[in-house]
Image: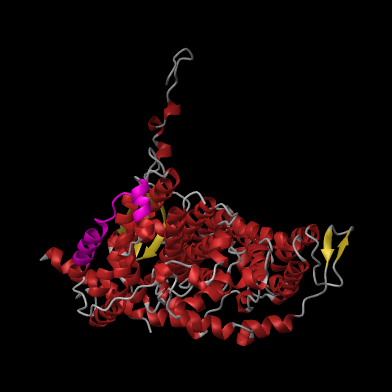
Amino acid sequence: MKNEALFRYLLRLGDDSLILGQRLAEWCGHGPILEEDIAMTNISLDFIGQAMSLLDYAGVIEGKDRNCDKLGLLRFEKEYVNVLLVEQPNGDFGDTMMRQFLFDAFRKPLYERLVSSSDKQLAAIADKSLKETRYHLKHSSEWVIRLGDGTEESHERVQNSLNTLWRYTDELFYTDEVEAQLIVDGILPDLSGIKAEWESTVKHVFSEATLEIPANNWKFDGGRKGRHSEHFGHLLSELQYMQRAYPNMEW
Amino acid sequence: MSTKEWPLWEVFIRSKQGLNHKHVGSLRAADSTMALDNARDVYTRRSEGISIWVVESNYVHANDPADADAYFEPSDTKIFRHPTFYEVHEGIKHM
Amino acid sequence: MKILETTDLEQKFQDKIDREVKIEPNDWMPDAYRKTLIRQMSQHAHSEIVGMLPEANWITRAPNLRRKAVLLAKVQDEAGHGLYLYSATETLGADREATIDDLHSGKAKYSSIFNYPALSWADIGAIGWLVDGAAIMNQVALCRCSYGPYARAMVKICKEESFHQRQGYELLTTLANGTPEQKELAQDALNRFWWPSLMMFGPNDDESPNSAQSMKWKIKRLSNDELRQNFIDATVPQAELIGLKVPDENLKWNEETGHYDFTPINWDEFWQVVNGNGPCNKQRVDARRKAKEEGMWVREAALAFAEKRKKKQTA
């Protein structure tokens, strides 16, 4: 393989986009109001598009003739390396927007750095995705603020969403030998500033939303190592059904 | 079941530099930020816009169509306002 | 208003219609014209929204990522179409949410086709090809409808709809040219969607009492039977091209008339489905009602927030 670290990193980015895109697609036809149905489907479409680009490129790097479909729809549970946050169930609209916001606030500073990657293809994907991410972050921040500072009911609901999802945020900043190798190779810039930017965005939005950051510090991770939550198997059964039921066919 | 609903907004889009904003329809939103975001999602999915205006429908004022006859003075009878009224020499260009 | 004046207005109104002059919001119009349009446009809007459900059902299970993306875009379009139509309905003074509540209570109807289940991936192809195909036929005719906002919404919708039909036909073509299992999926989908698609055009002309007035007011431009015949004539060759068999023993090209002859439709099923006894009526309406009910707290929160911000600004 040309660059195993790059392959593994592209899978991380691709799986985050794929799984979150899949979750958002579940809202189609069930949104709280028609305009929001359209907005969420739009965002889902952006993520699926990113997944296709990232996983196709991962396949090229791997050099084993696997494209975005073979990688996206035919790996086994342990081989997916998305963070746990994105596979959490949609819950109510507040849960979905909170999950989205916590992720978007991470993606924006990440892509802002990836646009200067020495790998032209990765930089190009990041450039296109950054435009989308800026809009996603605007949309999800606005909703967290509206719901946090809306009615008593919405405030309580979205505070609960935050309380539940906060424990998955540490994993966003997980790095290991994969990132380390790419930084040595010069493909990834220094990623250490991302957490501080994320914290700043999050604090600012939560302050406007009158939300409190939970005290509970027990954090979950494992996604990057292929160790998922119980929800993941069910998600895969839907995602992979057609490929498993009708193997080796063109669609 | 109906409780207080999001207000109605009219949407105007300029699709290209040099063109006017055109009325494309309406949507529901709770505030102007949402109205602009929603307009982007609904009316520019095929890159049909570079500038969006939204106005709460309540704030659009219109003349009464019943008075249209009187309101719009028939310009047909004021033919000196039409360029075709004036004869121009054949040799004159750019007019 | 004096009777004489009303007749005079009605005369002027019909005259505009006869001269193909568009009626715009706030123009004088007979009450029955306004009511008919509100009903037709809102039911058209409801059809787009309910129509999202059978297809949205397969987004998470699309067989590859490209098909997933295409289906997401298509269903999103349908939501947008619903929105254009609700927006056109509101120009007549109808309240969007009131018409939606009528949908949820069973008072308002939507196209009967969406009460059928999408049971396989091939159904997504059949829906695009046949259901969108039938809708396009109806919508192209409506682009010349007398009411301005409705006609304009139709023009916009028609532009976007042709992608829908093409992706459906392309999907089925891939299956029809694929493995025996895939061919079977495609044929099975056609078998189940053919007759309900024909029924989309509504009852036979002699069973449609409101049609005459709607034709006079140019809310309806072509009759049910005309549209249905046009659809059959266009679609049968498309099926034959990809080796699929239309499930009608009596389907035959008639050289004299220049149209296909077909088995007369059994309308019992249609009326049962329209009256609430189709396979999916309950689950469709339940899903829409649930979406609104579970979304109420979100809508209230957004309004409350907007109020707070307004107060802050004027303070």
Is C283 rendered above or below residue C150?
Answer: below
Residue C240 seen in the current view: yes
Q: Position of residue A71 (x, y in %)?
A: 54, 62
Q: Which of A52 and B28 is in front in this view?
A: A52
Q: What stretch is highlighted in magenta?
A: A180-205
Q: Position of residue C159 (x, y in %)?
A: 56, 53
Residue B62 relative to residue C263: left or right? left
Q: Nearer the viewer, residue C112 or A83?
A: A83
Q: Nearer the viewer, residue B86 or A20?
A: A20
Which residue occupies the extreme left position in the image?
C315
Residue A204 within the segment the image draws in magenta: yes
Is A127 rendered above or below residue A212?
Answer: above
Q: Position of residue B47 (x, y in %)?
A: 45, 49
Residue drawn at (36%, 59%), measured in percent from left and top?
A177
Residue A53 within the segment the image draws in magenta: no
Q: Which of C127 and A144 is in front in this view?
A: A144
Residue drawn at (44%, 79%), measured in percent from left and top?
C291
